[in-house]
Every structure is written in C-alpha cells, then in structure tokens.
C-alpha cells in the first residue's frame, strides 16, 4: 500500500498535528499559550468546552473570529456560535485563543461532568476527542506518563491509522 501510517503522539505544534481517533469527528487541544487548536472532519457551527485549573478571562482570534462567531468566555467555560449561521470550515488550526487567571491544566473532558458540546449547522452533535496530553512529545502528560496516545486516544496504545484511514492497528487494509 502507498500510504504513511500515523499513530498519534509526538509534538503538537498546531491543530494539524492532532489525530482524530476512530468514532470522533473532531479533536481539540489546549496549547501552553492559551490557543485552543482543533482538527475537524466536519464544519463547526457552535462549541462549548471547559478548562481545568484556571479561570478564563477572555477569548479572541482564531477560526472562531474569522467565521464571525460570538465567543463568550467566563469562569471555566467557553461558548462560541454565530448569530448569522456561519460555520468554521472543516480543517485544522486555532479555534480561539484564551486568556486566564491562573495556569490551566487542560480542557475539561465529558467524564468530569462538564459539557463538551460541538455541533454542526443542523444542530447535530459532533463527537469531540479532548487531547489533554502535554503535547511536547517528551513525556509528562497529565494523563499519560509516556505522553504517547494512539489514534484511539489510548495511552501507550498500539492502534494506528491504516491506509484506509481506519484506526485498528491492522495495516493489511
């Protein structure tokens, strides 16, 4: 087969470095400078996510601003949408840039009870993978000591995207 398998892990320098695990349509990650980067297979019409460890004091820039979104940020939540029905096109980049009071430890994940909600222009839920690895490729991630996540988001997992774009570790397809 004529393809390069990728399994995730390694340094995250922008949204295009994020792997979208099987079963998800979008991945998001909080960079050290406050940028929330994304990689999405679908257009985004609205988003809501939380931050752990710090209070959000502002949000600006990124693809949300480029699309004319109103982004509201306060306490530990950020909410973005367009009054005109505009969307953020599928692709990768910076979603928005947050400022904080304190040092955030990552983005809130659904199992913590805080809502992570992304939707498309039909108000259909977008399945979002929250990548809270340290992003430096040098270990020490909050959730995974090795900082290596496979395409299923499993710490030290062995699943890889094959030539068909399937995350299952079976390189024969």
Image (cartoon, helix red, strand yellow):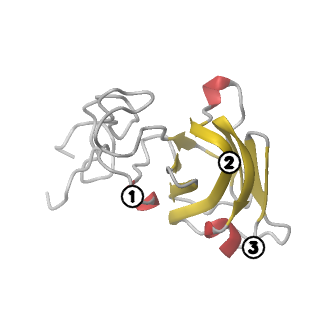
Cα distance between the residues tagged 3 and 2: 22 Å
For mark 1, does the 10 Å Cα neighbourhood hold few (<14), some (14 to 19), or many (20 or more) residues? few
- Disc tally is 3
Cα distance between the residues tagged 1 and 2: 20 Å
- Is disc 1 in contact with disc 3, using a CB cutoff of under 8 Å? no
Q: Residue at the spot x=46%, y=59% of the render?
A: 15
Q: Is residue 95 above or below residue 143?
A: below
Tag 1 residue? 13
Quarter of the image containing the N terminus?
bottom left
**For the residue labelled by badge 3, is the local secondary structure a helix, a strand or a loop?**
loop
Q: Residue at the spot x=28%, y=35% of the render?
A: 159
**For the residue labelled by badge 1, is the local secondary structure a helix, a strand or a loop?**
loop
Place of residue 149 in the rendered image (x, y in percent of width and height, measured from the top left): 34, 36
For mark 3, does the 10 Å Cα neighbourhood hold few (<14), some (14 to 19), or many (20 or more) residues? some
Q: Is residue 116 above or below residue 142?
A: below
Query: Along the polypeptide, which appears first: circle 3 or circle 2?
Result: 3
Q: Residue at the spot x=33%, y=26% of the render?
A: 145
Place of residue 26 in the rendered image (x, y in percent of width and height, measured from the top left): 53, 51
Place of residue 20 in the rendered image (x, y in percent of width and height, measured from the top left): 44, 48
- Is disc 1 in contact with disc 2, using a CB cutoff of under 8 Å? no
Query: Along the polypeptide, which appears first: circle 1 or circle 3?
Result: 1
Query: Along the polypeptide, which appears first: circle 1 or circle 2?
Result: 1
Q: Residue furthest front?
A: 102
The residue lying toward the viewer, choosing from 25 and 38, is 38
Residue 36 appearing in the image: yes
**For the residue labelled by badge 2, is the local secondary structure a helix, a strand or a loop?**
strand
Q: Which mark, by number, is residue 100?
A: 2
Seen in the image, is 30 located left or right of residue 163? right
Question: Image quadrant of residue 147?
Answer: top left
Q: Nearer the viewer, mark 1 or mark 3?
A: 1
Tag 3 residue? 68
């Amino acid at each position: 087969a004529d393809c390069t398998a990728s399994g995730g892990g390694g340094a995250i320098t922008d949204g295009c470095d994020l792997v979208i695990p099987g079963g998800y349509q979008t991945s998001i990650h909080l960079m050290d400078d406050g940028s929330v980067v994304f990689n999405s297979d679908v257009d985004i019409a609205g988003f809501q996510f939380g931050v752990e460890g710090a209070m959000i004091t502002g949000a600006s820039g990124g693809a949300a601003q480029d699309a004319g979104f109103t982004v509201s940020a306060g306490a530990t939540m950020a909410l973005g949408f367009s009054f005109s029905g505009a969307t953020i096109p599928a692709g990768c980049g910076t979603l928005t840039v947050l400022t904080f009071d304190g040092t955030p430890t990552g983005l809130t994940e659904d199992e913590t009870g805080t809502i992570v909600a992304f939707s498309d222009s039909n108000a259909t839920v977008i399945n979002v993978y929250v990548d809270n690895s340290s992003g430096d490729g040098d270990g020490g991630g909050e959730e995974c000591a090795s900082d290596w996540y496979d395409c299923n988001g499993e710490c030290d997992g062995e699943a890889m995207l094959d030539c068909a774009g399937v995350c299952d570790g079976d390189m024969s397809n």
